[in-house]
Amino acid sequence: MRHLVVTRAGPAMTVQDGGRLGMLMEGLSRGGAADSVALAEGAALLGQSVDLAALEMAGHGGAFTVSDTTRIALTGAPMRADIDGKSLPWNASHVIAPGQTLTVGGCEKGTYGYLHLGGGIATQPILGSRAAHLVAGIGGLVQAGDRLPLGPDARTEPGLVLGVDDRFSGGAIRIVESAQSALFTASERARFEATDFTRDVRANRMGVRLTMEGEGFAADRQLSILSEVIVPGDIQVTGDGTPFVLLPECQTTGGYPRIGTVIPADLPAVAQAGPGALLRFRFVSFEEALEAERRHRTMLRDLPRRPRHAVRDPRDMPDLLSYRLIDGMISAHDT
């Protein structure tokens, strides 16, 4: 079996896929990649299933070698990357051979970068997924010295690039009303929409803390709220008025009031907002949210058709002579 060998690992590197569906009633949140769009982008660049597992790198990457020639793709938050010192473009697929070293540095913007491998990371599934769920104690951090098994890869085509929209700098986020939105007065909800929030440095795969100037937010009768089901995207407001946006590894129940819920299409942008990034929230109707979800799913479905061939430098093409560089017939007498 082929392997990815981790020779150096960043502080919060995990194996992730789409997570575990249908486990909420068992007390286990879905988990999975913080940026689900990045998973789909990597699958499109490698022409493989979006269900395959990849390496999620939070803030910083690491150094890697392979046991066999392997196709890779880099997506998510842009990071500095090179193979043996030669810089690699992001949102693109490449090939790494045995004896070469892939080095991935820190984020240039955003939070979560992803390393995808041809055939996917083939660690043993647990409860139907290979995703590490650190809060639940499923899986763990990837460490230097780990040898991650890779699945079979029947394809060979590298050198594809994919244009992506910027979801790594914060910006406008759409939310819908949540179970306790009505406990916040209309003026309080309007103030929430008008507030510029900053993504705090205190964030992880459970949630993102938001900071702002001025007073915190409060709900009526918030001390009498019973714990109930919560989901990724919910915006909980703690006792001191600080909002937290919950992410894929959040708890499954909670008693803090929720002023709103981020729509699924915008949740990757919240997860990817780097420390200090500005975020603003806007309430939308359920009809608008459903339309946004429809467009989002259409975009994901169309991703496999969007990668294009990268322009390659002939000096870096050892197989250059295998290409038909001149074709057809010409006449010296044609004018």
Image (spheres, helix red, strand yellow):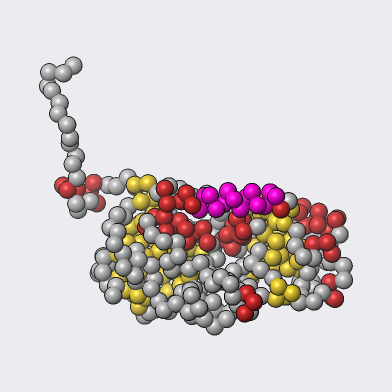
Q: Does residue 61 show up?
A: no
* Rendered location of residue 223, percent (x, y): 84, 75
The quadrant where residue 27 appears: bottom right
Of residues 243 and 229, the one drawn nearer to the viewer in this rendering? 229
Residue found at the very far left of the displayed protein: 332
Above or below residue 170? Residue 331 is above
Residue at (12% x, 22% y) in the render: 332
Asked if residue 52 lies left or right of residue 311, the reply is right
Residue 289 is inside the magenta segment: yes
Asked if residue 153 lies left or right of residue 244, the reply is left
Asked if residue 43 lies left or right of residue 2, the reply is right
Residue at (81% x, 57% y) in the render: 189
Q: Does residue 231 show up?
A: yes
Residue at (85% x, 76% y) in the render: 224
What is the span of residues highlighted in magenta in the rendered image? 287-300
* Rendered location of residue 320, percent (x, y): 19, 48
Of residues 51 and 116, the one drawn nearer to the viewer in this rendering? 51
Of residues 165 and 176, the one drawn nearer to the viewer in this rendering? 176
* Rendered location of residue 44, percent (x, y): 41, 55
Q: Name the chief secondary structure element in magenta.
A: helix
Query: Which quarter of the figure is the C terminus placed in?
Result: top left
The quadrant where residue 153 appears: bottom left
* Rendered location of residue 299, percent (x, y): 52, 49
User: Total marks drawn?
Assistant: 0
